[in-house]
Image (cartoon, rainbow, N blue to C red):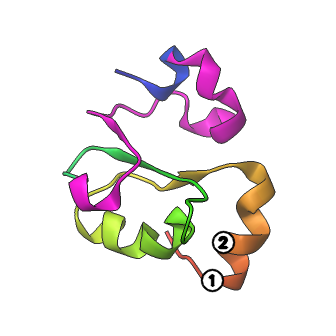
Amino acid sequence: MKLGDLPALAQFIAPMFYGLQFNRLILDSRAVQAGDVFIALQGQQSHGLLFAEKALAQGALHPRFHRHDALIAEELHVSW
């Protein structure tokens, strides 16, 4: 599947990633496998961006997050 095939996720995805092939969309970094896209969201206790590095190490293609969370990503020094 391609990210661009999911118009409901357009707010999370930059157009340059629409053609990205992936296996699954995952919200829980502990479940990430190679080829998955990790969607980092604010949870009740912490933000998923805290686990972006772990998701990448487990094979996530690219962590995704809402554009309003870009400042949080910057503050947490999330790199990808």
Q: What residue do we see at 54% from left, 68% from top?
A: 49
For the N terminus, the image quarter is top left
User: 29 or 33: which is nearer to us?
Assistant: 29
Q: What residue do we see at 76% from left, 51% from top?
A: 67
Q: Is residue 50 above or below residue 77?
A: above
Going by the numbered disc 2, the residue's amino acid type is Ala
User: Mark 1 touching mark 2, by CB under 8 A?
Assistant: yes
Q: Secondary structure at mark 1?
A: loop
Expressed as whole percent of the image width and height from the top left, the position of residue 37 reads 39, 45
- The image quarter in which residue 23 lies: top left
Q: What residue do we see at 80% from left, 55% from top?
A: 68
Expressed as whole percent of the image width and height from the top left, the position of residue 27 reads 41, 48
Q: Is residue 31 above or below residue 51?
A: above
- The image quarter in which residue 46 lies: bottom right
In this rendering, would 58 be left or right of 69?
left
Q: Residues within 10 Å of mark 2 (few under 14, many from 20)?
A: some
Going by the numbered disc 1, the residue's amino acid type is Leu
* Label 1 to label 2: alpha-carbon separation: 5 Å
The residue that disc 1 covers is: 76
Start-end of magenta stretch: 6-32
Residue 73 shows which numbered tag? 2
